[in-house]
Amino acid sequence: MKSTHKIVAPLVAAALAAGLVACGGGGSDDDDTPSTTTPSTPAASAPAPTQEELVSKAVDNIQNVVVIYAENRSFDNLYSDFPGTDSPLATATYEKQVDRDGTTVLTSLPPVWAGLTPAGLQFDTTVPIVAQTSTTGMTNAPFSINETYPGVDINAVNADMWHNFYQNQMQINGGKNNMFAAWADSGGGLVMGHFTGNASKLPLWKVAQKYTMADHFFMGAFGGSFLNHQYLIAAAAPVDPVTPANSATLNSHVAILDDGPQGYHLSVNTAAAGAASALSGPATSIFKSNGAQLTPDGYAVNTMQPPYQPSGNKPAADAAGVTEGVLADPTAATTLPPQTGPNIGDYLTNKNVEWAWYSGGWAFQTARATSPAGWAGSDYTYTAAYQADGVTPFVNFQFHHQPFNYFKRFDPTTAAGIADRAEHLKDAGVNGEQFIADIKAGKLPPVSFYKPVGNLNEHNGYADVLRGDQHIADVISALEKSPQWAHMLVIVTYDENGGLWDHVAPPKGDRFGPGSRIPAMVIGPTVRKGYVDHTMYDTTSILRFITRRWELPELPGLATRREGLKANGVDQGDLSNTLDTSAAAS
């Protein structure tokens, strides 16, 4: 279009000049005086837009942002040989795993103490059950799970591994990434495992190749799902100022650290069995504070439960029946007090931008959270994949994967809280069917988050990769056909690494992160196609994009992260580099 404009203006000017000459400039035929018409100056063309202007135009073109949040996989675990990455595992250099003293190189990887594929948890009954005894003596190096253990592939539910705030930092070990095996629990040497040959079998691989893969995308916070879900919506750790002040709870819930209240190295009980070496046993019970949900100064960093139902803590009793079944027991040590800090939902609402958190199984679970006496909790047993009929998977609703349910704005005992819950906390259906229905009907709000239910979220220990990956690919397919697709940006990523090793060290940011590298792909009609983006991103980059697109105030946590990274020489991206600006230039 621009080239057309540049040609037309001079032609018009020339035509006008020619017309003046043809009429003699208005003079008589008898006048011998030469015509003295002044040639018209061609109109100056507008200056070409700068790259920043093109990017801003591409950002403004987005009308719907959809975030799909899966679970617990490092980048190397699924995409170690993805083409176009700037550090493929096959040719990468990395340090061997060292023991708990921080210097002794392990002679082998520890066994997978819980067994590689726990019995009873397999959705695919053809998956072989690999016990601990078959995992001893593994070479101290990353290994292909499916090549080492034939029949165990992305269709298998493998053992879970620690993915906690302090342990993640201890495993990263200042960027060496060489103590993952040392500070692992029952997963043992499985932390070094990855799946190979995924180009032909991983549904989202094809999606990533079609659109943009980000190969320097890191978890927003160190550790697990609880904290990283908070970073997805608030870029900040929740607070519990009460519990740390109560010395009676110190050993069970507040971290005991070697390096001060704002440190990260948990104190080890050297007399505990297995404390000396990772080869002698898992790190499950060797710390002086094994729960460590809270920092000594009151930040909640490991799993705590929402103050409102649905919650992993039973409903609070209420003799008057006013709050019966809607509040979690506030006296339970792991019930987090209602949070009052800002989150992205607050800022969107204040700007009159509609948004929703779609949760798989939300309606199913809220129907189960009734009175204290009749409270059923989750339907999952952690001992079986299927219900009694042998066909229907357990829903496995995860309470700590619902980050907005921790905030006072969603208090179900107030009229305003009830209204906000109805407007923003949406049921996606047990298998995402309601979310897909809204996609097909073009009913998604400008900002949507989708959290698949437990059995479809790819989490180690209770879900396999294949079923979850196929589910998300099906959602992407529905989005591509949506009437809202033309102006849509979709981000598919994982909350954290699930305790799995990755060879790329995270950049230094602030006290809480970023943590290990995770997969992330950016999808949409206006993103770069077949592109691998090497820009440094983390979970909070999603918030940066939303903030930029709708001109929101910067969340305090975003400022802290930006300043922390900048102080360490790192510029954090806001995902705008994934957009194709060629359309904006036309």
Image (cartoon, grey):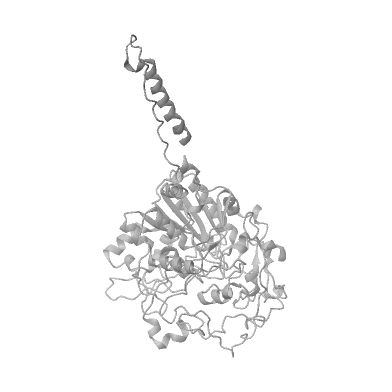
Say if 523 sits above or below 281 in the image.
above
Q: Pinpoint residue 124: horizontal percent, then vertical percent.
A: 62, 61
Residue 118, visible in the rendered structure: no
Q: Pinpoint residue 539: horizontal percent, then vertical percent.
A: 48, 63
Say if 90 sits above or below 314 in the image.
above
**Count the marks: how many?**
0
Residue 17, visible in the rendered structure: yes
Relative to the observer, which residue lies in front, 141 or 58? 58
Relative to the observer, which residue lies in front, 536 or 127? 536
Relative to the observer, which residue lies in front, 29 or 353? 29
Q: Pinpoint residue 415: horizontal percent, then vertical percent.
A: 27, 63
Q: Pinpoint residue 17: horizontal percent, then vertical percent.
A: 39, 22
Q: Left or right of 258: which side holds 240? A: left
Name which quarter of the figure residue 409 lies in: bottom left
Say if 349 sits above or below 296 in the image.
above
Q: Left or right of 351: which side holds 489? A: right
Q: Left or right of 95: which side holds 524? A: left
Q: Residue at x 72, y 66 (%)?
A: 148
Q: Left or right of 394: which side holds 35? A: left
* Residue extending farthest front: 33
* Residue extending farthest bottom: 271
* Residue extending farthest top: 30
